[in-house]
DNA sequence: CGTTCTATTGAGGGAAGTCAACAGTGGTGG
DNA sequence: CCACCACTGTTGACTTCCCTCAATAGAACG
């Protein structure tokens, strides 16, 4: 494929390096990956359930939601992907998507072919392990979402989500923990937390009235990190940051 | 370690083989794994959050729940593991558990050391890929649980869980799709679905009154599979069975 | 300057939670 | 053998959290 600009791949290297130790050589191999850049407009699905894909989608800029749907077509976002995340790394070994991917704001994707990913993994066992660890981290975050949606009320649920995204954005070099971009509509927030848009609105008002956060123009500002952590029952261990 | 009886490992081989193609040699390598058998009584935790483990836990018999907790200590089961499942395969690359494992009935575990698993994965790239695919399958099931808990009412939620476990048990050779063991208390069912035990009780009554299922003595009997599938909005694609 | 999407608010209803009581079951030990 | 206890299942009454429907206002966009 077309060689991709290193600028597009560096955040992915950083993401893997935040959980696995990568040698210089392994990093170079990743940065040498080719791919196809694709722009996706806000609220457009670019992978649909049941679709066969031959590439993985690396988020270069913007925000991506992986989602499932119930029989009525009501969506549930299961995972949010920020720049540097490979939105469907598992697709490399499971080429038939059983999920959808939607751009939640104007987004740029770098499509990397499965065969290229398999090749670098085969040539560099350290990368294969890093991919497995990345997959494990995704699973761990999913489990945390199950707990969040299953066992927390609306206020704690949103607080927990904001804590998670704050830590992830900061780690990814996308703003500060207390002030970062999260271009989600209230309807999207509802899809991510298992709430309705109306109830998200009321719950945000509650969070604002407690002077915990404010959300304006796709930006989240956290006024009291410690209290937000307590409110959401947040513990960052599940994100598996080590290195 | 002590060589494990092949009978304990064969279900694990079968589980991997249900999603990946394994050569004879790879299967032999798996069956040659050693381990330590451990009995765990019903409702005893055998892995706790934050604990460092040097082995993975293969379920030989019984039923295991992987769970998280909110700040109040209320549990949410995030995944159920039946015989043949490796309850914490991800722990191989993430040795510090950020989840708990509990036996939900009297259970036998085969503890397999991480180093042995790493060794067979390094010697047989096909197994490394099978592990990754297994990890992806777990993630896919977790995503389905997020959707289930986030976007379905109590009746559909339980119906979906029963459908999932029916298919998984049948695949694992543990009974028939329409009649299989699921030794969960109503309280456990609540922990798995994000409901309270009381509401599980009422919802089971509703399912019984619709002559969809009955639950007696740790056994689930499904009277009308098609209608249960419809009720739960169930689609088995997310379990990633292929081979 | 309409159109469309998003945010906001109110009113009312319904699904699920909480609290409490009691029955059935199995186990344990006197 | 039976009394006792702990756990599980069942049901009722009441409460609460969240959903649904609806209306309106603001913002973005052509």
Image: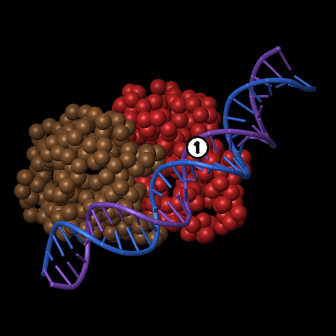
Chain colours: A brown, B red, C purple, D blue
Identify which residue, A243 or B34, lies in the foreground. Answer: A243
When asked about the image quadrant of residue A175, the answer is top left
When asked about the image quadrant of residue A239, the answer is top left
Residue at the (53%, 60%) spot, across then down: B153
Identify which residue, A156 or B90, lies in the foreground. Answer: A156
Residue at the (68%, 47%) spot, across then down: B218
Is there any visible trace of residue A45 in the rendered image? yes
Q: Does residue A126 appear left or right of residue B52 in this picture?
A: left
Is there any visible trace of residue A91 in the rendered image? no
The subunit carrying tag 1 is B
Q: Does residue A204 appear left or right of residue B49 in this picture?
A: left
Residue at the (20%, 55%) spot, across then down: A216
Identify which residue, A213 or B220, lies in the foreground. Answer: A213
State which quarter of the image contains the C terminus of chain A.
top left
Indicate the position of residue B240 as horizontal and vertical percent values: 43, 59
Q: Does residue A2 appear left or right of residue A127 in this picture?
A: left
Indicate the position of residue A141 as horizontal and vertical percent values: 34, 45
For residue D13, above or below residue C29 = below
For residue A226, above or below residue C17 = above
Secondary-structure class at tag 1: helix
Indicate the position of residue A190 as horizontal and vertical percent values: 36, 58
When asked about the image quadrant of residue A222, the answer is top left
Residue at the (60%, 65%) spot, across then down: B228
All told, the count of numbered labels is 1
Residue beneath disc 1: B188
For residue A50, above or below residue B110 = below
State which quarter of the image contains the N terminus of chain A.
bottom left
Disc 1 crowd rating (10 Å Cα; few below 14, some 14-19, many 20+) is many
């Amino acid at each position: 494929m077309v060689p991709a600009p290193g600028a597009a791949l560096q955040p992915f290297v950083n993401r893997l390096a935040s959980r696995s130790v990568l040698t210089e050589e392994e990093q170079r191999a990743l940065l040498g990956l080719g791919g196809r850049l694709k722009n996706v407009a806000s609220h457009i699905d670019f992978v649909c359930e049941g679709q066969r894909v031959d590439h993985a989608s690396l988020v270069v800029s913007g925000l991506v939601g992986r989602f499932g749907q119930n029989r009525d077509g009501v969506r549930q976002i299961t995972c949010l992907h920020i720049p540097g995340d490979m939105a469907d790394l598992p697709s490399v070994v499971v080429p038939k998507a059983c999920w959808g991917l939607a751009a939640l704001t104007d987004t740029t994707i770098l499509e990397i072919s499965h065969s290229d990913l398999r090749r670098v993994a085969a040539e560099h066992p350290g990368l294969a392990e890093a991919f497995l660890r990345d997959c494990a981290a995704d699973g761990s975050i999913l489990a945390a979402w199950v707990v969040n949606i299953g066992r927390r009320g609306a206020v704690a649920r949103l607080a927990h989500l904001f804590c998670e995204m704050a830590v992830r954005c900061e780690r990814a070099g996308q703003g500060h923990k207390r002030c970062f971009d999260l271009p989600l509509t209230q309807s999207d927030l509802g899809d991510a937390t298992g709430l309705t848009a109306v109830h998200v609105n009321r719950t945000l008002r509650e969070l604002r009235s407690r002077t915990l956060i404010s959300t304006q123009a796709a930006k989240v500002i956290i006024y009291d990190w410690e209290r937000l952590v307590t409110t959401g029952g947040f513990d960052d261990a599940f994100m598996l940051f080590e290195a």
